[in-house]
Amino acid sequence: MEKSPNKIILLGTILIIASIFGFLFFTKSNKKSVAEDGTIIDLTSSKKEQKQIEEKIEENPEINLTAVGDIILSRTVGVKIKESGDNSLPFRKINDILSQGDITFGDLEAPFLNKGDLVAEGMSFKAEPEFIEGIKLAGFDVLSLANNHTKNQGSEGLLFTFDLLNQNNIKFCGAGINFQEAHKSAIVESKGKKFAFLAYTYSDGIDFETHLSENEPDVAFLDINQVKIDITEAKKQADSVIVYMHAGEEYSPKPIEEQVNFAHSAIDNGADLVLGSHPHWVETTEKYKDKYIIYSMGNFVFDQEWSKETKEGVIVKLKYKDNRFNQAEFIPVIIENYNQPRIANDAEKSKIFNQMELKSSIINF
C-alpha cells in the first residue's frame, strides 16, 4: 500500500527528533576524553575542575634553557651598530633561536653608561644605553655581569647598568650594589619551576680586586668557600641552581686547574649545571657526578676576527624535565663583520665539535 506524502513527512520528523535526543543522551553520558598521558578528562566537569586537571597534567613540563658566551656591545661591535643605525644589529641572524628558549642566558661583558663618547677601541669597554634593544630582541631573561670588564666604568657604570637592566625587566647575577647583592642569585621562573642563577669571575688585579665592601657596587669573584654558601641559599629559593664562571686561560681549548676545581666544587655543593666563558675559544665539556660542565661557550658577540677560534662559539640549548637537566644541544656559530653571529656550516660545526670533544651535537645527561 502506498504511503501518503503527509505520513512520510511525519515519519521523517519523528526520526530526526529521535536522533537529536539520542545524540544528546550519548554526549551527556560520554563527555570524556583521554589525554596524551592516558588521563581521563571529564568534559562535563566545571571550568575550575577542568583547570585543575590540566594543571595536574602539566605539573612536570619540559623547560628549555638557552645559553651563550661572551657578549661585548662596545669597541668595534659598537662602531658597527652605530654605522648601521640598527641597535639590534648583532642579533639579527640569531634572535629567532635565542628567543625560542623558555629562559635565555648570556654573559654581558661591557657595562652600559650614558656619558662620554662611543668607545671604539682599547680594553676599557662601554656600551651605549640604546644597544639594550638587541638584548631585548634576542629575548635574554638573565645576564651574568661577573667578568673582568664589568667594572670598566667604575661604580657609576655598574649602577647605571643595574638600573637599565631593571627598567627592561632583565635579571642579572654576579654583581650588585654591595658584596651581599653580588652573591645573591637571580631567580627566573618558568612553567612553575624556579631557577637560580649565580655568576663568578676571576680577578685580574689592576682596579679589579674585590674590596669586600658592604656599601659599594661590586662583582662576585671565584671563591670555593663562598660559592658553597651562595648555593645553599639559592637552593632554599629555587628548584635548580645554575652556576656561571668567567675564568680560564685565554685562547686555550682546555680548562685550567682553577676552572676544574671551581666547577667541581659548585656541583659538589648542589649546582645542577655549570656554564663558562672568558677564554674566547670554545673548550671541552665534562660530565661530573651526572651533571654537565661546559667550560667555555666561546665568543658570541665579539670583535676578535684575527683568528678562526675567536670567531667561534656555541649556543647551548638545555632541556630540563623530571627536576633535572637531561639533554644539551650544541649549535655552533661563526661571528662575521666583527659583531654578528650566524649558524655555522657543516665543516665549521665539525671543527668546533672536535675542539669541544663532542661526538654529537646532542648529549644526554
Image (tube, rainbow, N blue to C red):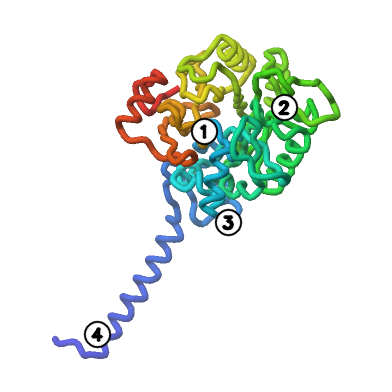
Q: Which mark is residue 140?
A: none
Residue at the disc numbered 3: 47
Q: Nearer the viewer, mark 1 or mark 3?
A: 1
Q: Amino acid at mark 2?
A: Val
Q: CA distance from mark 2 to mark 1?
A: 20 Å
- CA separation in Å, label 4 and label 3: 44 Å
Q: CA distance from mark 4 to mark 2?
A: 89 Å
Q: Residue 219, labelled with which disc? A: 2
At label 3, the amino acid type is Lys
- Residue depicted at x 71% and y 43%: 113
Q: Mark 2 and mark 4 in contact (Cβ < 8 Å)?
A: no
The part of the image, by quadrant, that contains residue 156 is: top right
User: Tags 2 and 1 in contact by the CB under 8 Å rule?
Assistant: no
Point out the frontmost of discs 4 and 3: 3
| First of labels 1, 4 by sequence position | 4
Badge 1 amino acid = Val
CB-based contact (under 8 Å), mark 3 and mark 2: no
Q: Which residue in the structure is indicated by mark 1?
A: 68
